[in-house]
Image (spheres, rainbow, N blue to C red):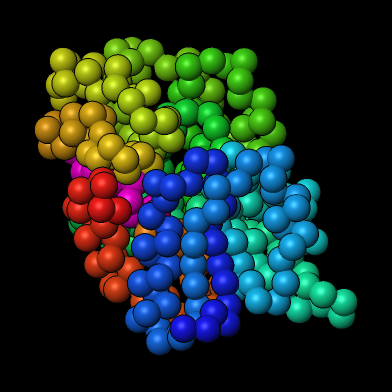
């Protein structure tokens, strides 16, 4: 098959990424012959040369860590949402008078909003927003989470972090978005009340980092009122998701955010409505396959 359009996910490491599964399933379902999606291991140092080499054979790039900030300085335009969040996870390649024009955008916010709405629907709150929310962690995904919560109606979430001294970037992003989070040091036991009472809890912490919170929840009990979205999908389920579910709380897995941010990327890169069901099926098969077969 002759390749007519290319797209890829960039990151380091990136071999574990399920983005090729999602995008390839979309191309197949849409009948886009000649479209190819791959994973390219790319460091921050490698990124400028790769971006400079993009031509009209490329439809776009998915960008993951540690490149979401660095790529912002390498594109021609950054959309307002990505500017506010301070992170680009999607680069779109378009024609220009001389060569190409590159636009950076952010579909993580869309993925978070859509995944959380699935959780609301599971609770019988279809279409509802969030009056109160807690965010665990203070990195790049936490910034996208603040934007998503703002869309859902919560502009004053509590942000629980392990170190207040490392929240400057997130505080700047919050100011750009017009949200006013309350920053606190995470104490697994002392924070349980806030977690159980919130309409929404989003854990943006890396794999295993939220395990002490899970242990505290399991030890002290109580049924959570709201929806938990843990963005980690490998390993799956996380200890926090398991403890939340065991306490009769509603859990949305991180794979739902992964799916929906990719759905929006497909729409932007192809100009076609993404085949959500086909992508969801492919993701489900990949997640249940042995790791060696992914």
Residue 121 in view of the camera: no
Does the stretch in magenta take in 114? no
Residue at coordinates 78% horizontally, 72% vertically from top-left? 100
As drawn, is 20 to the left or to the right of 236?
A: right
Q: Judge by depth and name the residue closer to the eye, 28 or 4.
A: 4
Q: Judge by depth and name the residue closer to the eye, 289 or 278.
A: 289
Q: Give the quarter of the image for residue 99.
A: bottom right
Furthest-right residue in this view: 98
The image shows residue 100, relative to residue 127, as above or below, that is below
* Residue 266 placement (x, y as % from top left): 49, 71
Q: Judge by depth and name the residue closer to the eye, 119 or 213.
A: 213
Does the stretch in magenta take in 255? yes
* Residue 181 placement (x, y as % from top left): 55, 32
* Residue 37 placement (x, y as % from top left): 49, 67
As drawn, is 74 to the left or to the right of 210?
A: right
Residue at coordinates 72% horizontally, 57% vertically from top-left? 51
The image shows residue 241, relative to residue 36, as above or below, that is above
Q: Give the quarter of the image for residue 229.
A: top left
The image shows residue 41, relative to residue 94, as above or below, that is above
Q: Which span is picked out in magenta?
A: 249-258
Residue at coordinates 70% horizontally, 77% vertically from top-left? 56
Residue 266 in view of the camera: yes
């Amino acid at each position: 098959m002759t390749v007519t359009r290319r797209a890829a996910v960039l990151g380091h490491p990136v071999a574990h990424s399920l983005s090729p599964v999602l995008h390839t399933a979309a191309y197949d379902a849409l009948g886009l012959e000649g479209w190819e999606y791959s994973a390219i291991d790319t460091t921050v140092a490698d990124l400028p040369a790769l971006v400079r080499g993009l031509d009209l054979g490329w439809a776009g790039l998915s960008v993951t860590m540690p490149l979401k900030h660095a790529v912002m300085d390498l594109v021609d335009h950054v959309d307002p949402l990505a500017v506010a969040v301070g992170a680009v996870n999607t680069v779109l390649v378009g024609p220009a008078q001389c060569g190409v024009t590159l636009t950076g955008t952010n579909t993580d916010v869309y993925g978070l909003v859509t995944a959380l709405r699935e959780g609301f629907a599971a609770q019988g709150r279809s279409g509802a927003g969030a009056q109160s929310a807690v965010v665990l962690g203070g990195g790049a995904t936490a910034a996208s989470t603040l934007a998503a919560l703002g869309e859902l109606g919560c502009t004053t979430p509590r942000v629980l972090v392990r170190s207040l001294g490392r929240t400057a970037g997130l505080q700047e992003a919050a100011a750009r978005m017009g949200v006013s989070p309350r920053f606190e040091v995470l104490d697994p036991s002392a924070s349980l009340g806030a977690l159980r009472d919130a309409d929404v809890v989003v854990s943006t912490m890396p794999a295993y980092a939220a395990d002490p919170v899970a242990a505290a929840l399991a030890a002290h009990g109580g049924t959570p009122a709201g929806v938990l979205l843990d963005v980690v999908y490998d390993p799956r389920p996380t200890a926090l998701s398991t403890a939340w579910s065991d306490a009769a709380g509603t859990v949305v897995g991180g794979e739902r955010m992964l799916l929906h941010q990719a759905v929006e990327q497909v729409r932007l890169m192809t100009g076609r409505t993404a085949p959500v069901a086909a992508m969801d099926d492919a993701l489900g098969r990949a997640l249940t396959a042995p790791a060696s077969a992914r």
